[in-house]
Image (spheres, grey):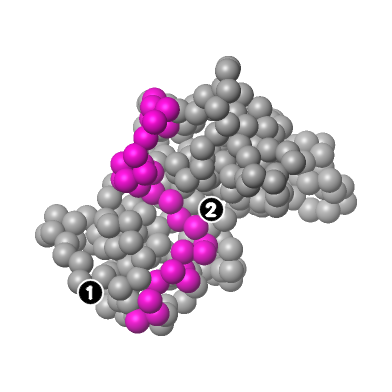
């Protein structure tokens, strides 16, 4: 079962984030948000809502605007090392698939996570301990029989599982999944969701970034919604994902229905 809530790994106070010098409005605006280890959370919103910016802030790729009354802390620090964050937060993004050499072996893709590298690992050296940790991560994703295949020979769902194994290999405190079912067919998406649910039940702290309410598993109780760079709602999913609130969030007439802990959303 998930562990009790632990330390804050993200604390945003009145945060603004600008994307580019010519931006007329901030990509994130006056955001207050606290995330803790031990609690899995879904970040939900339409395209352009600020989800990607929040993700880059969480992983240290972007910095917030410096001004009085505002602050961004990762694991309690307002200054951090990208290298350290890489080992404390595992991140999986759909675009990572294209960053690897097609002939790279699937297991080497997992090992590359220890160096924060993409592409060929032929000249990299890995310790026995790193190889054991990578093997454990592969086992968790149930793809051990595929480790000697070329990455390009895998299906989309299999490649996604190896990317998650890559993120898990260094045993991070937080796993961040950005639109994990993108480009997956129904069967692959269903299997990935099953594995995600297992990770949460095993105590992994997961941040799921998605635009689709139906992707949020029953084990994930808290939902944060974003629209136009602002937090709209933050709380228990049954209070956040109602017909009225989802209609406002997406600007479409929608109907929300709950079944077995899942939120099914249909147009009216």
Secondary element type, mark 1: loop
Q: Is residue 9 above or below residue 129?
A: above
Which quadrant holds the N terminus? top left
Alpha-carbon span between mark 2 and mark 1 = 28 Å
Q: Is residue 98 above or below residue 223?
A: below
Question: For the residue carrying disc 1, how many other residues have a C-alpha within 10 Å: few (<14), some (14-19), or many (20+)?
Answer: few
Residue at coordinates 79% horizontally, 53% vertically from top-left?
266
| Disc 1: which residue | 122
Percent x, y for residue 122? 22, 74
Report whether 194 appears left or right of 79.
right
Q: Are marks 2 and 1 in contact (CB under 8 Å)?
A: no
Percent x, y for residue 91? 43, 51
- Residue 125 x/y as whole percent: 16, 65
Q: Secondary structure at mark 2?
A: strand
Q: As displayed, is residue 184 above or below residue 115?
A: below
Residue numbers of the magenta segment: 74-103
Outermost residue on the front side: it is: 21
Q: Residue at x 37, y 35 (%)?
A: 80
Task: Work out which residue is located at the far top of the displayed protein and give it.
Answer: 69
134 in magenta: no
2 vs 1, front mark: 1
Decide if residue 204 is in sight here: no
- Residue 3 visible somewhere in the drawing: yes
- For disc 2, the marked residue is 178
Comparing 9 with 70, the one in front is 70
Q: Is residue 106 left or right of residue 97?
A: left
Q: Which of the pair 42/167 is nearer the observer?
A: 167
Relative to 4, is 233 on the left or the right? right
Residue drawn where x is 68% and y is 38% of the image: 26
């Amino acid at each position: 079962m998930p562990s009790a809530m632990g330390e804050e790994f993200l604390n945003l106070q009145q945060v603004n984030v600008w994307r580019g010098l010519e931006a007329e409005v901030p990509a994130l605006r006056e955001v207050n948000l606290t995330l803790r280890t031990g609690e899995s959370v879904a970040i939900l919103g339409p395209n352009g809502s600020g989800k990607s910016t929040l993700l880059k802030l969480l992983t240290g790729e972007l910095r917030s605007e410096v001004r009085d009354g505002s602050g961004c802390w990762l694991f309690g620090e307002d200054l951090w090392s990208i290298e350290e964050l890489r080992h404390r937060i595992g991140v999986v993004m759909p675009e990572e698939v294209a960053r690897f050499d097609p002939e790279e072996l699937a297991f080497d893709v997992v090992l590359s996570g220890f160096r924060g590298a993409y592409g060929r690992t032929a000249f990299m050296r890995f310790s026995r301990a790193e190889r054991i940790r990578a093997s454990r991560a592969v086992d968790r994703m149930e793809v051990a029989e595929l480790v000697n295949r070329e990455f390009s020979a895998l299906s989309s769902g299999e490649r996604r599982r190896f990317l998650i194994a890559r993120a898990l290999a260094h045993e991070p405190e937080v796993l961040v999944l950005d639109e994990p079912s993108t480009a997956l067919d129904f069967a692959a998406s269903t299997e990935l969701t099953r594995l995600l649910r297992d990770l949460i039940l095993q105590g992994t702290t997961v941040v799921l970034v998605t635009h689709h309410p139906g992707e949020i598993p029953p084990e994930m109780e808290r939902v944060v919604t974003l629209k136009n760079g602002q937090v709209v709602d933050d709380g228990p999913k049954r209070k956040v994902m109602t017909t009225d609130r989802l209609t406002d969030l997406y600007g479409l007439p929608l109907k929300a229905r709950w079944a077995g802990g899942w939120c099914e959303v249909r147009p009216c």
